[in-house]
Image (cartoon, grey):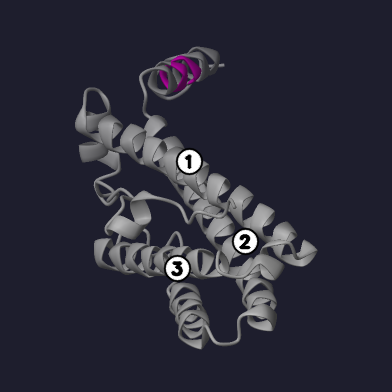
Amino acid sequence: MQTRAGYPFGARLTALVLLATLLSGCGINNIPTYDEQVKAAWAQVENQYQRRADLIPNLVETVKGYAKQEQDTLVAVIEARAKATSIQVDASTLDDPQKLKQFQQAQDQLSGALSRLMVVSERYPDLKSNQNFLALQSQLEGTENRIAVARRDFIASVERYNTEIRTFPGRIWHSLMYSSMPVRTNFEATAPAAEKAPEVKF
């Protein structure tokens, strides 16, 4: 079977398959692949922060039962949680450095408030031996570890993505096909409270 150009249909099909194979082998798909990995890694960061936020109401109620006089500290935790959960960064706003910075700062403030709550809890032996408090303490500690891992994975995925669009051959594909996909801002600690997870061991 001949085409109008005189080349057999099979030869043209083979050439297209070969071209597609060569393009896929030279990194044309790396940028969108790494972009999706960044979004998936960010979703894990959000999931772990939400897990922490979900633990806080029960933690506050438990502490309140033994340390009602620590009202200022409890209110600070509740307010920091409300602020942290009100700022959402999803795939559509992940490229907004200002939004990401606001998210980081709110999470850092919540980390600081939780640290102060754990220090206050040291003053109450009955609270420290309460089974519900011990369970929440263990869950919070595990969640802080998961947050650290999720943040690390997100940072690594952003570095991989940014490196791809700044180096050869990714830089070429970026300029030709993916110019609308910007260099991404990474997730870094912005306050001293964020450099150390809340201490929850007694």
Q: Find out whether the residues at labels 2 and 3 contact each other: C-beta distance under 8 Å.
A: no
Q: CA distance from mark 1 to mark 3?
A: 35 Å
Task: Say what secondary structure mark 1 lies in.
Answer: helix
Q: Mark 1 or 3, which is nearer the eye?
A: 3
Report the span colored magenta.
Answer: 17-21
Residue at the extreme right: 131
Work out whether 51 lies above or below 156: below
Which SS type dominates the magenta stretch? helix
Q: Earlier in the sequence, mark 2 or mark 3?
A: 2
Q: Amino acid at mark 3?
A: Arg
Q: Amino acid at mark 2?
A: Arg
Q: Mark 2 or 1, which is nearer the eye?
A: 2
Residue 189 image position (x, y, % from top left): 31, 53
The residue pinned by badge 1 equals 37
The residue pinned by badge 3 equals 116
Q: CA distance from mark 2 to mark 1?
A: 21 Å
Looking at the figure, which quarter contains the N terminus? top right
Q: Quadrant of residue 47?
A: bottom right
Q: Which sits in the foreground, 201 or 152? A: 201
Q: Counting other residues with Cα less than 10 Å from the Cα at mark 1, is it few (<14), some (14-19), or many (20 or more)?
A: some
Q: Which sits in the foreground, 62 or 34? A: 62
Residue at position x 51%, y 70% in the image: 120
Task: Say what secondary structure mark 3 lies in.
Answer: helix
Q: Earlier in the sequence, mark 1 or mark 3?
A: 1
Q: Which mark is residue 51?
A: 2
Residue 109 image position (x, y, % from top left): 38, 69
Q: Counting other residues with Cα less than 10 Å from the Cα at mark 2, is it few (<14), some (14-19), or many (20 or more)?
A: some
Work out whether 199 lies above or below 18: below
Q: CA distance from mark 2 to mark 3?
A: 19 Å
